[in-house]
Amino acid sequence: MNVGVSTACLYPLETEKALKLLCQSGVKNIEIFVNSVSEISGSVLTEIKNIIKDFDCRITSIHPYTSGSEPIMFFSNYQRRFLDGVEQYLRFCDFANELDANILVFHGDRKESNTPNEFYFERYLKLYREALKTGVYVCQENVCRCRSRSPEFLKVMSSTLKDEVRFVFDLKQARRSDTPYSEYLDAMQNKIMHLHLSDFDEKSDCTLPNQNGKFDFAAFLKDFKDSDITSVIEVYREAFKEPCEIGRSLEFLKNTLQI
């Protein structure tokens, strides 16, 4: 298992600048949070590729900025918009391929949606299969504001789609859903490809992982230690004062994995 950092931690710093800052800090495994469609091609893509080459880092995953629009893009009854959404996400897959990444993080429909599970799974499966043709796995993440906040929903999704579903597990989203993380791990079974890591304390439910936090990373990570699952620190900018704190958090996790 490797651990890294998401460029999302440095938002609203421009994506290529966030990538370079993480690389300069010694981070070797990075998730790129795409903040604009203009970043997946042209001069910005060229700059991103040059940074990756110069610092010899690995891009573990791609997280589209359009996550918040996925309910209307993929789960309305307007078929043409759904097909357009698939084509748009295939462009993110092309971007992932440019960077040798094979994971695309997917949030899905809003929790208030009353569309049948079968409809959701059918739409996800179409996207999953089209993306996999390019070598990219669309991975359903547990998200507090989405249907995926429910471990039961994820369990049904896993059993229905069998080998044609993959997952991202996010610790902060589990906390915000008031659900023990073990329930998500049980629901996702052995189909987790990626982890989003964060800690918590008395003041915040999303902090950088460190020795002052409340979460037991030694217990959590022991089952993943020898796996090929990728993981990144993903917190919000208010979770730290200086970017150097991210590097210390990463070292804490690396040391924890040796326990």
Image (spheres, grey):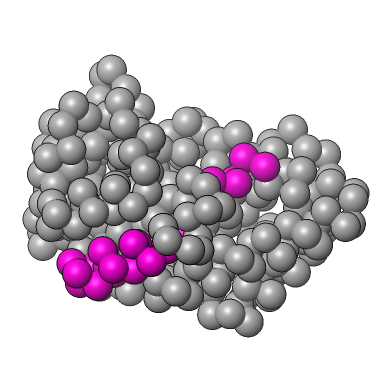
Could you tell me what secondary structure mostly forms the magenta stretch?
A: helix
Residue under the point 75% across and 69% down:
126
**The residue positioned farthest toward the front in the image shown:** 43
Q: Nearer the viewer, residue 88 or 235?
A: 88
Q: Nearer the viewer, residue 119 or 74?
A: 74
In the figure, is residue 102 to the left or right of 140?
left
Measured as percent of width and height from the top left, residue 138 is found at 58, 65
User: Can the viewer see residue 10 in this picture?
Assistant: yes
Q: How many numbered callouts?
A: 0
Q: Is residue 189 above or below residue 78?
A: below
Measured as percent of width and height from the top left, residue 240 is found at 22, 29
- The segment highlighted magenta reads 45-69
Measured as percent of width and height from the top left, residue 251 is found at 11, 51
Q: Is residue 145 magenta?
A: no
Q: Is residue 208 above or below residue 162?
A: above
Residue under the point 74% across and 33% down:
112
User: Can the viewer see residue 189 in this picture?
Assistant: no
Q: Is residue 212 above or below residue 109?
A: above
Q: Quadrant of residue 80?
A: bottom right
Q: Nearer the viewer, residue 142 or 23?
A: 23
Residue under the point 38% across and 35% down:
12
Q: Is residue 68 magenta?
A: yes
In the figure, is residue 119 to the left or right of 102?
right
**The residue positioned farthest toward the top in the image shown:** 203
Measured as percent of width and height from the top left, residue 24 is found at 14, 54
> What is the quadrant of the N terminus in the image?
bottom left
